[in-house]
Image (cartoon, helix red, strand yellow):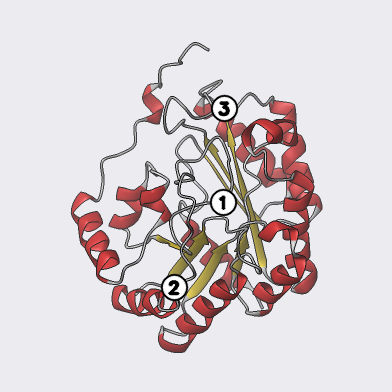
Amino acid sequence: MEVIRKPNWLKSKKLGARKAREIINKLRKYNLHTVCESAKCPNQGECFENGTATFMILGETCTRNCTFCAIDKTRKKLDPPDKNEPKAIAELSKELGLKYVVVTTVTRDDLSDGGASQFIEVIKQIRSICDPDISIELLISDLNGDLEQVKKIVNASPDVLNHNVETIPRLYHLVRPMADFERSLKVLQTAKKVDSSILTKSGFMVGLGETKDEVLDLLAELRKIDVDIITIGQYIAPSKTHFPVVEYVHPDTFEFYKKEGERMGFKLVESAPLVRSSYHAEKAKKILNKKP
């Protein structure tokens, strides 16, 4: 397949180099990782400059074989959950004075609970030592379809529960061969059933070969299960061996998706070429502050 050249609008702003070094040094001090680094996010400098980062728990090796992802899938031996990790995240969050914390994970199908207990412990530790005003967003895997674990996570009271569908249903067998679209919808739907007040969030990429109508259909499916926040960004292949970019979607199309999403009733729509699932995540705090 012919390689498509990146357009000018995909050049990220070179912001936050000094702040990024400072935060990365602190992460190493606590033996922590961010998805910002592992997934080669183009916005990490900007986010670090704003003093925000997405902590990635349960190691750096994934048990899935998604063809779009930059996270390591090659190691056969997976590390057990680090018992010190939740406390370290809480202590660093307090040290940095964070008001909004995002916690995600690699998919760990090897763990009996998919890693749910580690998420719950992170919430517990943050709530115990950080500012009471701190908000917690979790970006979880599908937990291998174990909805009881989803319920346990929601009952631990995160402020935002995020699970990304990543792409349209038609492309799942090519992009997410070990995942299932309906299973992902059930994760988000279950979260709302357990706690109707929790903010649910999802995100997906474009440029993988989807049509405009398929994107609108996907947005409609997510609204049907009362998802509150959506993120839409351009897929950028991490290497030549990953799924190829089919199209670099024009910014005007992203704006069209944003307006359509808002028209459908999403409370927040982040839609632009360089948007990633945790980009400007702290904007959810405005919605949280409006809750009765």
Assess whether mark 2 and mark 1 are in contact (beta carbons under 8 angstroms).
Answer: no
Mark 1 vs mark 3, CA separation in Å? 25 Å
In three-dimensional space, the C-alpha distance between marks 2 and 3, rounded to whole angstroms, equals 36 Å
Circle on res. 207: 3
Q: Nearer the viewer, residue 122 or 241?
A: 241
Q: Is residue 273 left or right of residue 53?
A: right
Residue 63 badge: 1
Cβ atoms under marks 1 and 3 closer than 8 Å: no
Residue depicted at x 58% and y 28%: 253
Disc 1 marks a residue whose amino acid type is Thr
Of labels 2 and 3, earlier in sequence is 2
Q: Quick check: 268 left or right of 127?
A: right
Task: Give me the residue at 49% from left, 70% from top.
Answer: 81
Q: How crowded is mark 3: few (under 14 residues within 10 Å), some or many (20 or more)?
A: some
| Three-letter code for the amino acid on which mark 2 is drawn | Asp
Q: Badge 2 is on which residue?
A: 82
Which residue is drawn at the image coordinates 34% and 36% (left, top)? 12
Q: Residue at x 73, y 66 (%)?
A: 191
Q: Is mark 3 on a helix, strand or loop?
A: loop
Give the amino acid type for the residue marked by disc 3 in the picture.
Gly
